Amino acid sequence: MVVPFRTVVVLTFLLMLRTACYAAVVNPETHVNIINYLRLGVDLTVHCKSKDDDLGVHVIPPDGSWEFQFQPNFWNSTQFFCKFVWNGGSYWFDIYIQLRDKPYCVKNCDWLIIPNGACRKVEGVPHAVDKCFPWNP
């Protein structure tokens, strides 16, 4: 039995559309909020990227924040990494790793940046920190 090419194209398109819709329901848009919690009275310069997107350089004042949002992918492999610079030093941290962070921050990932690393806040609970991570080596 030979299936017409047009049928194959339409079925492929419908399958892709179904997958995209499913991914949007399973992986809702995620907001990452980076908070300058250095407590040093200095600006925090942040440059975040993924393998596909460069979010540019942003300067966060003391106790200020900067936020970006994205749609996590269907394969649970979304990752964003950031370079943090203050007082002449620079540090790297993977600010979002889908497999690590999705269970803890479904829609909002708030991160307190402290001198020793980054602390993930508990979603929906003010002033509660879930876990602190050291800077990447």
Image (spheres, rainbow, N blue to C red):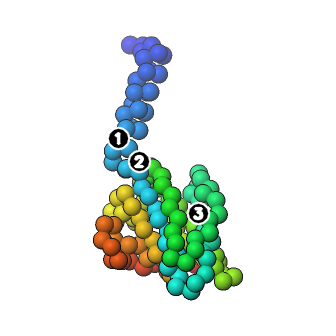
The residue at which mark 1 appears reads as 22
**Vertically, is 47 above or below 5?**
below
First in sequence: mark 2 or mark 3? 3
Which residue is at 63% across, 79% downward? 86
Q: What x and y, as percent, mark residue 2?
A: 42, 13
Left or right of 117, for residue 58: right
> Are the residues tagged 3 and 1 within 8 Å (C-beta)?
no
Question: What's under tag 1, amino acid-wise?
Answer: Tyr
> Are the residues tagged 1 and 2 within 8 Å (C-beta)?
yes
What separation in Å lies between label 3 and label 1 (alpha carbons)?
A: 27 Å
Can residue 111 be seen at all in this image of the molecule?
yes
Q: What x and y, as percent, mark residue 14?
A: 40, 27
First in sequence: mark 1 or mark 2? 1
Q: Quadrant of the N terminus?
A: top left
Left or right of 8, for residue 54: right
Which residue is at 48% across, 16% downward? 5
Q: Residue furthest bottom?
A: 40
Q: Residues within 10 Å of mark 2 (few under 14, many from 20)?
A: some
The residue at which mark 3 appears reads as 48
Can you tell which of label 3 and label 1 is closer to the viewer? Answer: 3
Q: In this view of the protein, which residue sits in the foreground, 100 or 6?
A: 100
What separation in Å lies between label 2 and label 3 (alpha carbons)?
A: 21 Å
Tag 1's secondary structure? helix
Question: What's under tag 3, amino acid-wise?
Answer: Cys
Disc number placed over residue 74 in the picture, else none: 2
Tag 2's secondary structure? loop
Question: What's under tag 2, amino acid-wise?
Answer: Phe
Q: Quadrant of the C terminus?
A: bottom right
